[in-house]
Amino acid sequence: MKLRSLLFVPGDRPERFEKALTWGADAVILDLEDSVAPANKPKARDSVHEFVQRHAGETKLLIRINPLASPECEDDVAALSGLQPFALMLPKAEGAASVRKLASSLAAALPILPIATETPAAIFEIGSYRDVSDKLCGLTWGAEDLPAAIGAATARRTDGRYTPPYELARSLTLFAAHAAAIPAIDTVYPDFRDLNGLRAYVGRARRDGFSGMMAIHPSQVETINHAFTPDASEIAWADKVTAAFAAQPDAGVIQVDGRMLDLPHLKLATRILERAGRVT
């Protein structure tokens, strides 16, 4: 399942929906939560329902509903009646219990993508997502709601990098996703005009083990897709490593281009080929 880029579109801006399908994102998130003012949420539900009804199955459409504790959530779930989007995004999720609660309220089973770090309590539940991995299509995190919830001035240093508490939240999400064997999706880079900063950010995400990233603007999609797509040199290395291990199936350690490689290198090579669409 390829989820390199997931592009947010406000649910009350239906004139942007069709355009969003042309911007190259692997998935489009139709948002009913933060980007929609309370007075516009009924209109947004109607617009999202009509669009998903027409386009489900043609592309990966996710719907970000309002948090379970919000009075808006019940109306969001009701508006999903008869729809089969690719997945639902659950904000302010607090571990497996939140996933089970949402799943039990749905008329039909839908994959869920939790945002795992938006409340203080959520941090202590991140490891539980592996208990509901069969209900998930990935795991992501956010760096905006948590500092607001605890009264922090910001989640970022002056150079744009996260301060230690939010690096911890990011790391826990990364490891929890891999423990559950689901895609680890990094959070948004909010300054959509700063493409150099985005390149550095998404490069770190790829380096650290994330497999995709959310975007808030179409201008970010190409950079994100490029970063999470293996280049020719990576694919050539992965081919060489997998071929070398295949030729010596009983070997725990092999030599490739003067380097000693062991099974973790084979796992990395296999992941690269999976991302390149060479392994299913």
Image (cartoon, rainbow, N blue to C red):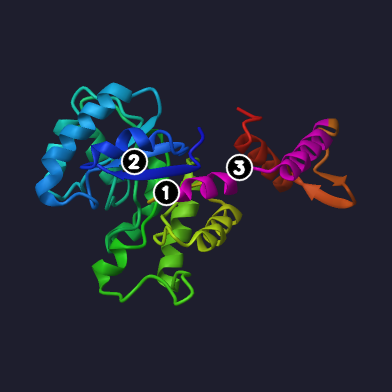
The alpha-carbon separation of the residues under discs 3 and 1 comes to: 15 Å
Left or right, 122 with respect to 245, comes to: left
Q: Position of residue 186 (x, y in %)?
A: 46, 52
Element under disc 3: loop
What's the residue type where badge 2 is placed?
Ile
What's the residue type where badge 3 is placed?
Thr
Q: Residue at x 27, y 60 (%)?
A: 119
Mark 3 neighbour class, 10 Å CA radius: few under 14, some 14 to 19, many 20 or more:
some
Q: Position of residue 150 (x, y in %)?
A: 26, 71
- Residue placed under numbered mark 3 in the picture: 229
- Residue placed under numbered mark 2 in the picture: 29
Q: Which residues are magenta?
A: 218-246
User: Are the residues at dot 1 and dot 2 in contact (C-beta closer than 8 Å)?
Assistant: yes
User: Are the residues at dot 3 and dot 1 in contact (C-beta closer than 8 Å)?
Assistant: no
**Residue 235 located within the stretch drawn in magenta:** yes
Residue lying furthest right: 258
| Vertical position of residue 70 compared to residue 193: above or below | above
What's the residue type where badge 1 is placed?
Met
Residue 214 is marked as 1
The alpha-carbon separation of the residues under discs 3 and 2 comes to: 21 Å
Q: Position of residue 10 (x, y in %)?
A: 26, 45
Q: Residue at x 50, y 42 (%)?
A: 4
Pick the front one: 259 or 213: 213
* Quarter where residue 256 is shown: top right
Circle nearer the N terminus (1, 2): 2
Circle nearer the N terminus (3, 1): 1
**Residue 105 located within the stretch drawn in magenta:** no
Left or right, 226 with respect to 269, comes to: left
Q: Residue at x 28, y 22 (%)?
A: 54
Can residue 211 be seen here? The reply is: no
Pick the front one: 178 or 167: 167
| Vertical position of residue 226 compared to residue 208: above or below | above
